[in-house]
Amino acid sequence: MPTDQTDSLRMFIGGLAVGLVVGVGGVLLATRPPAGPELAAIRSPPLSAADQSRVQDLLAAGNAHLRMENHEEAAAMYERVLSEFDCANVEARRGLHATAPDRLTAPLRPCGERSRS
């Protein structure tokens, strides 16, 4: 038969467990590494609405080529995003890493140096 002391002890232990889970989760969230060590110092310039749309189109094309197992074309789409628009785009970096990791290690033009017409 439960007593008031038993109920209080259960509530205290339950509260302690919840506090521990929230605290550990907060620490893990605060200390998680960025998408890649080299991305910590990279800042992409803001993109126009037209450029953002083009980036989305290129990523979609890369994903479609990847689904068709055309890895070379998929890598080309991801590489264009990184070299022409956004050198820190995480989705393009992941796609390029999955299709042609050797291209990801090649030096890309620094962000902000665009040579498009």
Image (cartoon, grey):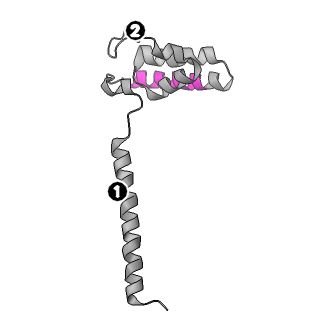
Would you identify the image quadrant in which residue 23 lies? bottom left
Q: Position of residue 114 (x, y in %)?
A: 36, 11
- Return the residue at label 1: 23
Cα distance, mark 1 to mark 2?
A: 48 Å
Q: Secondary structure at mark 1?
A: helix
- Could you tell whether 16 is left or right of 79 in the image? left
Q: Residue at x 39, y 89 (%)?
A: 4
Q: Quadrant of the C terminus?
A: top left
Give the vertical position of 18 relative to 117 (above or below).
below
Q: Position of residue 107 (x, y in %)?
A: 41, 11
Q: Residue at x 41, y 84 (%)?
A: 6
Would you identify the image quadrant in which residue 36 lies? top left
Question: What main secondary structure does the magenta stretch of the protein show?
Answer: helix
Q: Residue furthest right?
A: 68
- Between circles 1 and 2, the one closer to the viewer is 1
Q: Secondary structure at mark 2?
A: loop
For mark 1, does the 10 Å Cα neighbourhood hold few (<14), some (14 to 19), or many (20 or more) residues? few
- Return the residue at label 2: 116
Give the vertical position of 115 relative to 17 (above or below).
above
Q: Amino acid at mark 2?
A: Arg
The image's mark for residue 7 is none
Q: Position of residue 73 (x, y in %)?
A: 61, 15
Q: Nearer the viewer, residue 86 or 37?
A: 37
Q: Residue at x 40, y 66 (%)?
A: 17
Give the vertical position of 23 relative to 71 (above or below).
below
- Could you tell whether 11 is left or right of 68 in the image? left
Q: Amino acid at mark 1?
A: Gly
- Which comes before the other along the chain, label 1 or label 2? 1
- Magenta segment: 46-63
Q: For residue 62: magenta?
A: yes
